[in-house]
Image (spheres, grey):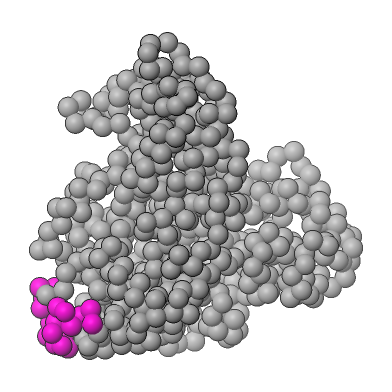
Amino acid sequence: MIPSYDPNDTEAGLKLLEDLTTNAEAIQEQVLHQILSQNSGTQYLQAFLAGESYKNQQNFKNKVPVVNHDDIKPFIQRIADGESSDIVSAQPITELLTSSGTSAGKPKLMPSTAEELERKTFFYSMLVPVMNKYVNGLDEGKGMYLLFIKPEIKTPSGLMARPVLTSYYKSQHFRNRPFNKYNVYTSPDQTILCQDSKQSMYCQLLCGLVQRSHVLRVGAVFASAFLRAVKFLEDHYKELCADIRTGTVTSWITEAACRDSVLSVLQGPNQELADEIESECAEKSWEGILRRLWPKAKYVEVIVTGSMAQYIPTLEFYSGGLPLVSTMYASSECYFGINLNPLCNPSDVSYTLLPNMAYFEFLPVDDKSHEEIHFATHSNTEDDDALNEDLIVGLVNVEVGRYYEIVITTFTGLYRYRVGDILKVTGFHNKAPQFRFVQRRNVVLSIDTDKTSEEDLLNAVTQAKLNHLQQPSSLLLTEYTSYADTSSIPGHYVLFWELKPRHNNETPELEVKTMELCCSEVEDCLDYVYRRCRNRDKSIGPLEIRVVSLGTFDLLMDFCVSQGSSVNQYKTPRCVKSGGALEILDSRVIGRFFSQRVPQWEPLGLDS
């Protein structure tokens, strides 16, 4: 099920894509047959199939239930604790992938195998011919892609648990990848694999600047990471230019392999280049800085769908008109599909699912509840209780214009697993459907790889309220909502709180220390991924609480009703997104407070 072709052969790659999408239905049948033939003897499937290998898709759907992470967590935890892989997979589980979602405050774990790395390598190789179809001459230069690894966790079994991208970059498939003239990086592998994210960022930017005349595209995986790099460049360009001018590397780059690899790229002093770069960076405005620093760049490659769409205006400011390209849709659980029209407007991005990556099913969701509502969002946990498995359809049977939650059965031990992504069908390429990513189920806030649900936010706010508002301040928190503020880099969470004294309706007296403690308490109660982003990655700024005057949330309700909400069914949105709602809230702010410390985080062992 993993086709082979020469990634340097664009025509062969495009033909393979046509074959895969034309035969989507037959390939899906083959995928399920192969998965069940291999894994029917696992403990998990034995409980439902009683050793049956494979009859047909309907038999599988009748007997194996749709599950979420809480259902499969005990099975994966047993493997993490040292039991055999055949609990869920006939192939050895070689590592566990940590999802950006969490369970009980710790990363969700997903099983993975050696073969799955081959499948991902194939997936990445399919991106190349698509870009070559739309952009000429990519074999005549390099890509400045800023790629990073994150911390790993050692489980009691000895298996490593790590984010999916860290897994791939550390694998032999990446480090020993064959030369591809269309996919040459400015960053030496040693800089990508550097454990210190600040040293990694500095060295990768230095290499990208030195090779600016060869750079044909720039990017990172996520828009948030790329914008952090722009901010880092803004803060460090003088030091970077000094290194280019002298042909040396600043003393605080202490990682030996990283340092040596950069020195080999520098190849001595370059006064003229340093002056050119410094002149551009010293301009008052950084509008169009990407095009000015890398004049041959043809596009910016970053994911700008889903929660990353909030960064599009900032990217457009820096890019100087360069197209923003989202090439792929993937997660820790599975790599799904690619964008066959990569130069489209970011708001029009759709991903075509590759039918050989996994077995895909789709659970219809209420179209109205999952339309992108521009003034507010509610997370809807009631969908979990109303699951009707009879409504689930296969890959080729989805309907254009409908919304679905994706359900996957993988080669690595996930069976009818709800990923939690809500997708809208926008069309078909041959027989393979194309989807627009709408949102993550139940997620209300996201800045980087964090995904904070309404429940997570409620628990954190409740804890802060109990510990710091009731005594000694005697304030009541009457309402709250939130907002992901990405107007600065890094972005940060903003909570709008309406507070009133317990014994009167006067304007509350706000003690700075108390409110700052509330900010810190909320952060302490948010999950592992949020705290890692704040503490280690520095990809999220300090949480802010904006206290609004009494009656503000009544005005917010009036606004929401004026936009079409029902008065009878109105619930305060726990996240606001529209300009109108934000204007109401911001116009009535009477106090702003920020967390004064970074929340604790460390890569704890999963048995602790």
**Rendering coords of residue 165 (x, y %):** 50, 69
**Residue in view at x 45 percent, y 48 percent:** 526
Stretch of the chain drawn in magenta: 43-62
Main SS class of the magenta portion in the image:
helix
Front-most of 127 and 375?
375
**Residue in view at x 85 percent, y 57 percent:** 242
Left or right: 527 in relation to 184 = left
**Rendering coords of residue 246 (x, y %):** 89, 63
Residue 578 visible in the displayed image: no
Q: Is residue 149 above or below residue 538?
A: below
**Rendering coords of residue 306 (x, y %):** 40, 52
Residue 149 visible in the displayed image: yes
**Residue in view at x 34 percent, y 85 percent:** 84
Quarter of the image with the N terminus is bottom left
Q: In the orientation shown, which residue stands out farthest toward the front?
A: 472
Front-most of 64 and 177?
64
Residue 315 is inside the magenta segment: no
Res 36 → quadrant: bottom left
Left or right: 343 in relation to 2 = right
Q: Is residue 26 above or below residue 480?
A: below
Front-most of 281 and 13?
281
**Rendering coords of residue 598 (x, y %):** 59, 46
**Residue in view at x 61 percent, y 63 percent:** 146
Quarter of the image with the C terminus is bottom left
Q: How many marks?
A: 0
Residue 45 is inside the magenta segment: yes
